[in-house]
Image: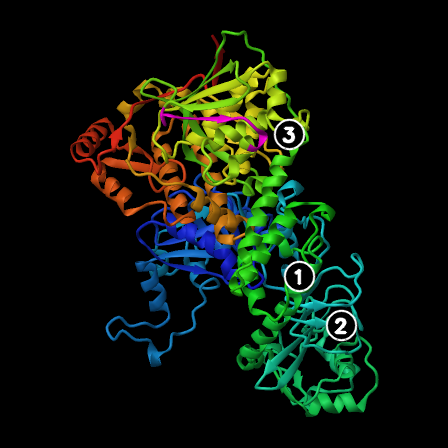
Amino acid sequence: ALGQKLDQTLLDLNLPVFNKIVAAASTSSRVMIASGDMIIRSDAELPQLPDADIVFFGLWAKPESARDFGVMFCDREAPEKLVTFLQKPSPDVIRERSKKQLFMIDIGVWLLSERAVDCLMNKCGWTKKNQTFPEDTPNVYDLYGKWALHLGSEPVEEDCEVGGLPTAVVTLPQGGFYHFGTSSDMTQSLYELQNLVTDQTKLGAVSTLAQPRQFIQNAVFQAPLRREENHSLWVENSFIPASWKIASRNVLTGIPENDWTLELEDGVCLDLVPVEETELCIRPYGYADAFRGAVGDSGTQWINRPLGDWLAARKISLADAGIDPATDIQTAPLFPVPETIDPAFIQWMFAAEPEESDVWRSLWLESRRLSARELGRQVNLGRLYAQRNALRETALPLMARNCEQSIFYKLDLENTAKRYAASPFDLPAELDISSLRNPMIAVHDRMFRAAVLRRRGDESWRDLEKETFGILRDLIVRRFIGQPSVPACTLLDDQIVWGRSPIRLDFAGGWTDTPPYCLEHGGQVLNIAIDLNGQPPIQVYARRTAEHELVIRSIDLGLEERLKTYEDVRAYDKLGSGFTVARAAFALVGFHPDFNGGAFQSLEEQLQALGGGVEITMLAAIPKGSGLGTSSILAATILGVLSDFGGLNWDKVELAQRTLALEQMLTSGGGWQDQVGGLFHGVKLVETTPGLEQVPVVRWLPGSFFSASAAGSGMLLYYTGITRVANDILGEIVRGIFLNSSRRLATLKAIGDNAAFCYDVIQRNDRDGFAEAIRRSWQLNNELDSGTNTPEVQRILDAAGDDLSAAKLLGAGGGGYLFMMARDADAAGRIRHSLGKNPPNSGARFVDFSLSETGLQITRS
């Protein structure tokens, strides 16, 4: 996924799901317990969770994979009812029980009520009277291996106190569970996570699909690799020079910078653990070592062989090592802390057939040796993290230099820029867009460089950021430069072309239609086309004139301009120019050499060939800053009218795409949902796929949901009298998208998912579900931009009080029109009365709206 961070933890990746669970939990839940060696994924919204003392979360699994986890056997008629909990049952036991019961693996996340917490504390020796544990320390009590066995209608072991706790099992919808408990778990889980998405068009600037099982992170790696011969490789916090020979199933961690010569064997893992201020402990182990059992037991393995065989091959006895045969391998002192590290000694320790060496034998025996348990307590975490951070910093310019193959420009570049800015490195060489397979990499590159310079206090970041938006603009607009248009007048002398468009109300998905997000992820928006007070509020008229000039008039503004040269037309992105939308529309239609292939030397010559000038008259019967997509829909309407005037025959999809380009030409940015919302009639879910050519695919919904009786069902449209221009908001959010900000990308994905949810509830005529979709939209818009809900707007919402079921500002927020859903028709009446009697300002008012069944209409007189 885009937006990963180099310093992220398992907890970072799990928090979104944990937060989902907390949000959906019942009011009786008090504590969440979660295992720390896993990643949980859930792509669906959670339903309201059941009210029980213990809520388990499970996933369906095969017996062979379930054997390594806790398994919940549930009532076949009621899967939420736990029958029995077994810890790591065999596949045969699971199959036998599955004849009568359903089974799921326990993913290690439990919700506990206050009563369940009290019960657990009692089992650990807590005394309520004294409010203490015995000797101030809880007794050891196994949550999964003991407590869980008492739960369910048919527990493994009876316990009245524990068994009396009501339980519930929730299947995690569209979920995934990835375990990081063993070396093989790590490589398998990461491989599955890296290949979740098989549609390579959705993998961003650099694809990671079909990569080998070789995972190198926070490391400098110079050793030669072959994909098949060096599989199941995990390297972290390590410096691996070219003199190392890598095998397969190697896990290498904590290796400091070195020039050693080492030849690893299959399944050999090596960890160098910092202890105290300067020392390193050598910890070799085997890829499949379970690391449990008595050292004197022939089944207890170390470095892929029985521990006894390892000792015998080096002519060492347990007595020589001072280890009791009954000692568990976890507490056996096996790992030496020599004064200096010699690679030959490391090779001797892990070799299947070690060289005969009294020197290495003596070194191992005489060195201070630590057990696995002692290492966990004595590791110097400060040194460990310092090495990791230094290696991560060193790797940054290397990753940037190799950006077309590395994940560099898929990272959360806000986070990466912060780290890069604090490093001593110069910026990487600027990428040449013409040499890139994917030009979007150059867009991310420029914005990343601007972010680094900004953090370093270099004012040139502003020019670089401006250049970034320029590259994006050129990528979108250049398609139309390459498809020149030469309009010809197709009107009779006395004819007028008349275009009328509704405006749109956006309910869910807005912002996912905005470049560059939609170019890399596709967009998903649900909106409706409406008329206001019985009329389409945007209207444009065009006619031919005798004078060789382009005339622009606005009825609502009472202004007029005349364009006589190509320079006048091209002033659409100049400060102080009026009618910028209309100027850009004239250019895009072909009244400028950029878009007509240079067919004419001047506008005068072009209009002579046309047989006269063109006059357009516009009416936008909506206040500025309304949040209803006015400027984009006006642009699309002008383009539609001029297309008809000039015989260009552009359909609505073409008009939507050209309007997206027009918005970029104006340097204001913007997405495609506004124009699509007005061009196409009715209630609709609009989707696009990733790519520079954004082709809207429209799926219509029944209009009866927003019929004339909608107001009676509690739907209200209110003009707040407050306006807000979206440019600054747009620029800030788009900057975050350029930089793959994980926070912004996560919110945008949730916004897109909510559009699909909204589509579903409207299709089912679920008004409560629709209200929930509106509430989610409002919440997510506020997450994306904290300025969405101003104090003035909040006062309006407060005035509506408990009569309000859901509400959201339309468009970017901050003002304009407010869509409200009252709890019922009577509540709607009270809201109308309250706000009508005490409006927040002189411009605030309710507006009647009706569903447009036509979208854009173009006719001739």
Q: Which residue is drawn at 43% across and 56% down?
A: 110
> Residue 801: x, y in percent?
21, 40
| Above or below 359: residue 592 | above
The residue pinned by badge 2 equals 241
**Residue 428 numbered mark, or none:** 1
Mark 2 residue element: loop
Mark 3 residue element: helix
The residue pinned by badge 3 equals 593
* Residue range highlighted in magenta: 556-567
> Residue 248: x, y in percent?
76, 64
Q: In this view, does 255 lie to the left or right of 29?
A: right
Q: Is residue 283 left or right of residue 762?
A: right
Mark 1 residue element: loop
Q: Say if the magenta span includes residue 640.
A: no
Give, as a three-letter code, the residue at label 2. Answer: Pro
Q: Residue at x 55, y 52 (%)?
A: 465
Tell me which label, 2 or 3, sits earlier in the chain. Answer: 2
Q: How far apart are marks 2 and 1 (CA)?
A: 23 Å
